[in-house]
Image (spheres, rainbow, N blue to C red):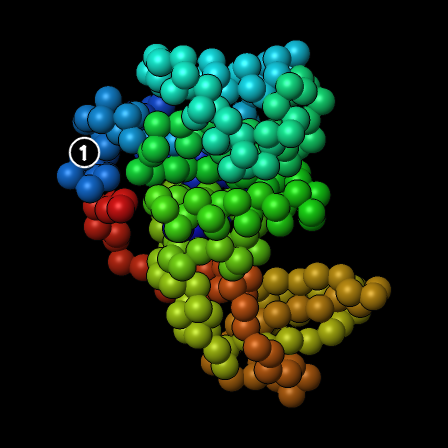
Amino acid sequence: MFGLLGPNGAGKSTLMRTLATLQDADGGSARLGEVDMLKDKDSVRRTLGYLPQDFGVYPKVSAETLLDHFARLKGVANGRERKELVKALLQQVNLYDVRKKALGGFSGGMKQRFGIAQALIGDPKLVIVDEPTAGLDPQERVRFLNLLSDIGEQVVVILSTHIVADVTDLCQRMAILFGGRVLLAGAPLELVESVKGRIWRKVIDKAQLAEHQAKFQIISNRLSLGRTVIHAFAEAAPDASFAPTEPDLEDVYFAAITGHLTPSAPAPAAQVG
């Protein structure tokens, strides 16, 4: 599973739509095995599962009926085969018991799991999920991420998200995208190790934030119990009031998008799978 991490507007959805053959690239190249993803779009579509950021459903149609319809559209013509496929997919995403329920009554997490079910029709080699956990409650998020983790053991999954914890929990490899460019790429643990000893923590009053931002390389700030916790990026303690802190992927992310980590060299042609 590959994580594509970046803020809203970084270009993640544009890249996902391009890989999903829904829009043309301005340049560059991308391959899925031996398939040129930018030129041989029919081959890509035959091996692709896609869950877009805004996945719409017919609210008055049942999960079973709509999934059967999607299977027809993907070329599963045999009725018995299609019935067994729909049953297996709904069981895989834990929606079989509510298969007769109208999709309009599904929770956000249930709709996302239904979206994964339709993405898995046709045994895809590549599954693209774009911002899948945005708006989910904690329990649904965990259930959905567990499902993605299981799927990632069988096929290539590209997870596009602005939520750092999703990448931390799931992905063995990742890239940080910002302003349409890849800033950093690699294994999350290795990227965290690269900033070890360079992240410093301090608790301040909120009124002091602007002063510290002007004086130090502050990469993030958050409120905690009425005080502001800031993290600074520096090779040594910015001053005696800062304490070293164990970095995490969020520190890597903020250090990259605030320009304190050197961007990667221009990336080669994307290789998926």
- Is 231 on the left-hand or right-hand side of 19? right
The answer to which image quadrant residue 93 occupies is top right
Q: Nearer the viewer, residue 234 or 146?
A: 146
Q: Residue furthest front?
A: 80
Q: Disc 1 residue type? A: Asp
- Residue at 59% of width from left, 29% of height from top? 96
The answer to whether any part of residue 102 appears in the image is yes
Image height of 207 relative to 21, above or below = below
Q: Nearer the viewer, residue 23 or 75?
A: 75
Q: Secondary structure at mark 1?
A: strand
- Residue at 67% of width from left, 62% of height from top? 221
The answer to whether any part of residue 20 appears in the image is no
Residue behind mark 1:
36
- Residue at 66% of width from left, 43% of height from top? 140
Q: Residue furthest bottom?
A: 240
Q: Tell me residue 168's x, y (percent).
A: 51, 59
Q: Tell me residue 9's x, y (percent).
A: 50, 38
The answer to which image quadrant residue 250 occupies is bottom right
Q: Residues within 10 Å of mark 1 (few under 14, many from 20)?
A: some
- Is 125 on the left-hand or right-hand side of 16? left
- Residue at 64% of width from left, 83% of height from top? 243
Q: Nearer the viewer, residue 32 or 228?
A: 32
